[in-house]
Image (cartoon, rainbow, N blue to C red):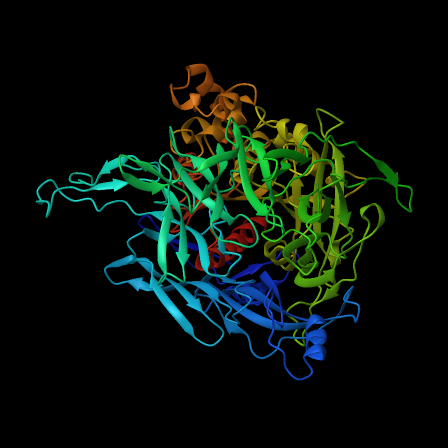
Amino acid sequence: MSTTAVIGDQYVNDTTSVITADGRTLELDQLADLYRSEASKPIPVAGRLSSLAGDGQQQQPTDNSSLNRQQQQQQLSLTIDWKVRDLDRMEPTRHATQHLLKLTADGQHCKRLTPAIGQPVDVTNEAATVLATSGDPSSRRRLRAVIRNGAKDPQSPTKPKQWLEIWDQSTRLKSLDLNEVDEHLSIVSGQEFTSFQWSPTGRRLLYTAQYKPPKAQSFYKKLAAKPKSDDSAAGSKVSTDTRGQEFVYRDDWGELYDGVSHTVVAILDTDADYKIRVIQMDGYSLGQPFWIGNTGDDRIGFVGWVEQPRRLGLTYCPNRLSGIFTVDLTATTTTDGTTIDAKPELICGLNKLCVKDPRIAPDGQSFVYLENDSGGPHHTATRLRRYDFLTESIETIIDDNGKREIVTDTDDDGNRRYSDQLAALFLNALPVKCFFESGKHLVVNCLTELNLVLCLVDIATKQWTPIQFPLPSAELIDLSHDISVVVGSAVNVRPNVFVGRLNVGVKNSVTVQWLELTDESDNRKSLATELTYNNYWLPSADDPSKLITAILVSPIAVATKPAPTILWPHGGPHSVIYNCFAIYPLLFARLGFKTLLVNYRGSLGVDRQYVDDLTGNVGDNDVKDCIKCLEYLSDEKQSLVDINGLVLFGGSHGGFLVTHLSGQYSNDWNFRSCVTRNPVIDISVMKDISDIPDWCYCESFGTDTAAAAAADGDHDFAKQPPTGDQLRVMFDRSPIRWVASVRAPTLLLLGRRDRRVPYTQGMRWYQLLRARGVTTRCHLYDDCHSLGKVDVDSDVFIHTAVWILKHLN
């Protein structure tokens, strides 16, 4: 059904139709419609609960004021932001819907969640928005701040305009062009740095921005005046003569942070004509700022990441040396007759530690945060800690040394099954709003082997307990008035919003009645009629005490019989595939495929030892675990996978694994094709070009060698070149070692702007396979590591579908 014409070295696609794994014929337009049908469905990404009376504000008396207050206390406004892959605009768009939540008369349960009020509002250009939840009790003014992306700057076509807007309840009070302010460059987005908070008084706004250096100029331009001195936060004087500095190289924070080299904390004062004040520290990039106390606006805290001797990639890497600092905004010191800001004070972190996500308690007298040892695996179990301002002490609420015990029981048919349980805390970030109003409890998300669960944490007893939820995946997006707003989903259930009031009982038992958001459309209906799935726990080949977990996603029609299967190991490698909705397994099922999602040793959700089991063993343990899953599901007893219809699909470390499999096991398994996105091909080369060279050493040699060197903050691995023996180990652990054995037709999907696994890795694989006569093709996109842009992802799906179906048949 397809042919390929060759004109010189260019390929012209003549494919008109494909035959699916279950024997149907689909035109290319039908493939495009298949993707469009799912891409157009909105996904909830954020939610905000607010009181109809205005949180924290005193209301002026009116007729029937007592009755009005009672009614307002029983009703809350819920705003939900939804994201859509817009294939008309070829960009992600966002819209907001408004809903009304009614509570029971006693306020202990959610009674009714009404559909959207009015039409959705497009908020695509709103990068962030925050409402002042408190304010001056004598005033009814309630401010809202918005970071808005505007049109591109005509003087710099590649740089978009960015505005900071301040609104009251009736009008826009101020628009600040952030490209033109003198104090800093653009506001930094991304969860590693970002924070956007009003002070308790509702007068000052706190955020993170890029440092604005003096403008560099040529040696051949005369200075208009004698160079001035610029006082830094630490009191040192730095010359502003920047002649000859145009081409100085400056480190940045890698993937997703191109050009972000040095960040500062900024405070906007609405009562001082919107004046901006900046806090900066030499040698540290600052982020995640927060207000200290719950009544004033004169003291802040923030995280500082060490910049020397070099910046390593921060995205997906919560193991960078850092500390939490505080500063009194009213305090000053005098040096040589010059008054300068007080120096920030370190209160926790550093000393071989990584700290992040400080969340202030409701009383303002303490905060909780996450802590890990710096260096080592980029993700592992984390410690939940608490800092008390009154005693200046730190306590551990949840430690990271919990050990998983294998617990088994039997199902109704007498088959042994394993219990998914909590042993250690695994999470990507603390929710921005995680505290109960009392401050005695907080709610966190925790990754287990196969689920994402909500947990209640008792600060006093240091106990943590799972909270029941109707679906396997539950992600907290807001907690207000002790009411949680949660996005729930499963492999066969699209994401939707649930709300419920959390009532804590004896021994931290939690009772909650969940309400699900519904509407008259079919955008959020269950997919149970199309998909089903099974969870598996399998002993690994080398160590029966280490269990591999996997999810087999199947079309209903072939759920109990063998069918062509796509093997999809996750990236990381220290990540996890849990039971939540994803668009690709659904689309693969509609093409007649099963999808086998594998959590090999080293994945998250078990304990630290399980994570460490892979470091120093990549290309071995993880590869064997993928094969173990295939062997189990394709044997005569299970017979769920068609061994003559196997396809490999994976990205990043998942790409590392599928290219490994296509070489190491080409004589044992008949892989019909391989599709890989930004794969790691040669670790010995990647160490010099990636934004995370420490990953190459840690995964190749383990935590007792290179990782320990990285953890001391001195980056020993960067001080001297690797030895020949070290290079040999890196090479031997890489897919490139097995290139001579590869026979599977291979499609490579690469990002030109990938800082994590630069596209030259995949390009080398493409060139080697092509030279050896293996059917191969390469697509190079103007995108980063995730290949997440709408025009890119939509193109990736069509080419992936055509490739695997063409070579299956």
Q: Is residue 543 left or right of residue 384?
A: right
Query: In percent of the image, x 50 and y 70: which residue is there?
Result: 141
Can you say whether 741 is above or below 25 in the image?
above
Number of numbered labels in the structure image: 0
Q: Is residue 90 left or right of residue 336?
A: right
- Residue 308 in percent (x, y) is at 38, 30
- Can residue 527 be seen in the rendering of this structure? no
Residue 631 or residue 101, whichever sits in front: 101
Query: In percent of the image, x 79 and y 58: which residue is there?
Result: 512
Query: In percent of the image, x 70 and y 24: which residue is there?
Result: 542
Query: In percent of the image, x 42 and y 15: which residue is there?
Result: 724
Q: Is residue 527 left or right of residue 131?
A: right
For residue 401, which quarter of the picture? top right
Residue 697 or residue 76, whichever sits in front: 76
- Residue 566 in percent (x, y) is at 62, 47
For residue 120, which quarter of the picture? bottom right
- Residue 791 in percent (x, y) is at 44, 59
Can you say whether 65 is above or below 778 in the image?
below
Residue 443 or residue 547, whichever sits in front: 443
- Can residue 15 be seen in the rendering of this structure? yes
- Residue 578 in percent (x, y) is at 67, 46
For residue 107, which quarter of the picture? bottom right
Can you say whether 655 is above or below 518 in the image?
above
The residue sitting at the bottom extreme is 63
